[in-house]
Image: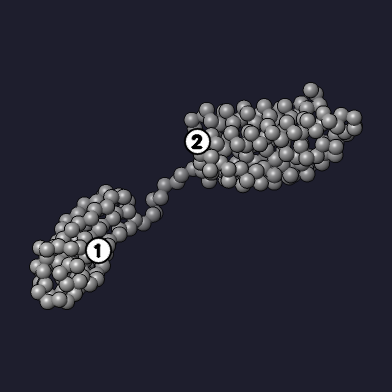
Amino acid sequence: MSKNRDLVSLAAAAVLLAALALAVPIEWLSLLLLAPLAFLFSGRAIVAAAFVRRRPPRPQTLVLSVALSLAVLALVSLPLNYLGGLTAASWALGLVLVTLVACGIAALTRHADEGSSIRPPRPPRVAPLSAVLGLIGLLAAAAAIVLAFTPLSASNAVGFTALWMRPVDGAAGTGVRVGVGSEEKYTTSYRLQVHLAGESKPTGRRIVLEPGETKVLRLIVSPPPSAARPAFVTADLYLTGEPDRPYRRVYGWIPAGGE
């Protein structure tokens, strides 16, 4: 049991951190608890399973652990995506499973190789400056993880409005179906004018849209044309506060009779 004490501690820490991360309601704290499991523990367990007879020195073990953990993140994401999606629970379960399996393989391999003597490497001497730089690097990595998963306000984002038009059949006259979709940041009021070439008075509507809302209007812009010739139609969308400058404009030809 003492021979596998490091594996037992590693597996227990992985399970404990995963459970705490899923239980904590604070998002940034949950991500902080998952960071060692995601960036160190799974790779460390694989190193223990791969290097049984000759363990690498601790600096190389640390580098291999981080590199293999990143590889595990990339590979585990593929099956998780198809087995329920990439959620905090699926990530925690997948990483814990990899860690436990690797620890189990390492324990079995050590048991099969009990006859050989394994000399643990001597603890390396770490200079104070190297220790401080390593600590700063770990803190920076943890802060980057927390920042990457923290939603930020988009105060400088610019909204937009979509406008489209298509002809429709109508016995009452030449008709168009006009769609207005708002992705603005605030509730926006518009004035829509649809003008048929040769007609003096446009057809107008006032529209108020919430962010993310879309409205589709069916408008009759003229009586049916007597001649079998297409009609040119223009749709202009104005902001209520800017009545003299079109905000969006679309135009096109409508077949005779609205066909």
- Where in the figure is residue 128, as x and y percent of width and height? 76, 41
Q: Say whether residue 80 is left or right of residue 13.
A: left
Q: Residue at x 24, y 71 (%)?
A: 252
Per the image, label 2 sits on a secondary structure element best described as: helix
* Quadrant of the rendering where the N terminus is positioned: top right
On residue 92, the disc is: none
Q: Residue at x 68, y 32 (%)?
A: 100
Query: Is the residue marked by circle 2 packed among few (<14), some (14-19), or many (20+) residues within 10 Å?
Result: some
User: Which label's residue is closer to the chain start, 1 or 2?
Assistant: 2
Q: Nearer the viewer, residue 201 or 27?
A: 201
Would you place residue 23 above or below residue 241 in this image? above
Q: Kindly identify which residue carries mark 2.
A: 27
Can residue 243 be seen?
no
Q: Nearer the viewer, residue 149 or 71?
A: 71
Would you place residue 130 above or below residue 104 in this image? below
Q: Residue at x 67, y 34 (%)?
A: 99
* Quadrant of the rendering where the C terminus is positioned: bottom left
Can residue 158 be seen?
yes
- Where in the figure is residue 174, as x and y percent of width and height? 14, 67
Q: Label 1 amino acid?
A: Met
Q: Say whether residue 132 is left or right of residue 18.
A: right
Would you place residue 259 above or below residue 159 in this image? below
Per the image, label 1 sits on a secondary structure element best described as: strand
On residue 165, the disc is: 1
Q: How is the image coloured?
A: one colour
Query: Is the residue marked by circle 1 packed among few (<14), some (14-19), or many (20+) residues within 10 Å?
Result: many
Q: Label 2 amino acid?
A: Glu
Q: Quadrant of residue 49?
A: top right
